[in-house]
Amino acid sequence: NAGVMQNPRHLVRRRGQEARLRCSPMKGHSHVYWYRQLPEEGLKFMVYLQKENIIDESGMPKERFSAEFPKEGPSILRIQQVVRGDSAAYFCASSPPQGGVRNTGELFFGEGSRLTVL
Amino acid sequence: SQQGEEDPQALSIQEGENATMNCSYKTSINNLQWYRQNSGRGLVHLILIRSNEREKHSGRLRVTLDTSKKSSSLLITASRAADTASYFCATVLKNSGYALNFGKGTSLLVTP
């Protein structure tokens, strides 16, 4: 049973380019969360999505950042016109549907995508 | 702002010693979770303690929760070099389902 899969693991972009990070949740999980981690820092919540719906994007910068979780395929975090300050590790996590007996509140994390902006 | 705040920020001990990390939070909670992150890796869930529990054990881990003081502690007994990692406490982000709010973590170094 594969865990949360993120790709690419490492991504290098020049300033002004676009970065696309992908996340496939664990099988049976319909909730996806994106977090950003700067060096030596904790994780900062960015966005919480269910299939075809953004539930909470309160942690997402208003400009240049967007996220989606389509009916088919992985969740995508898109960063347009990247700047050096976007360099960070981006983690995706997933969980089962809320309210189900399988949902203990635990999040299952991928190994992260490390973005470097030159 | 971060809901959970861990202290100390860094802790260095020798193998066999116990390691204690503390976490404080600000608002009421249903549960509090602890996660571990090895360098360059994703977070792994360690243990969850509910608001009506005071103490919980899992192997060499012991977690306490004091809701009156809005604090929790994680104790790792008989530490091993493999316990070297960062440890984060997490509480549910208000009004956001199961999205969690993490502190900055405690970096634990266990030397042989």
Image (cartoon, coloured by chain):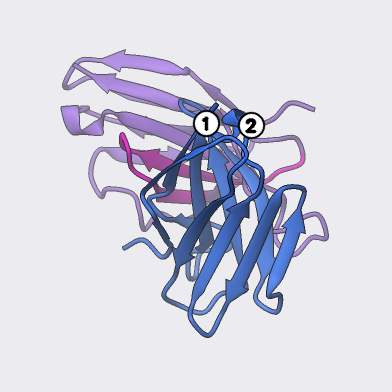
Chain colours: A purple, B blue
Q: Residue at x 41, y 65 (%)?
A: B3
Q: Residue at x 41, y 51 (%)?
A: A45
Numbered disc 2: secondary structure: loop
Question: Which of the two discs, 2 and 1, sits closer to the camera?
Answer: 1
| Badge 1 density bin: few <14, some 14–19, many ≥20, Cα 10 Å | some
Point out residue A116 in the picture as x, y percentages from the top left corner: 28, 20
Which numbered tag is attached to residue B38? 1
Q: Residue at x 27, y 28 (%)?
A: A87
B62 horizontally vs B40: left or right: right
The relative height of residue A27 versus residue B17 in the rendered view (above or below) is: above
Subunit under mark 2: A
Q: How many marks?
A: 2
The stretch of residues the image draws in magenta is A28-48
- Quick check: can you spot residue B17? yes
Identity of the residue furthest to the right in this view: A101
| Badge 2 density bin: few <14, some 14–19, many ≥20, Cα 10 Å | many
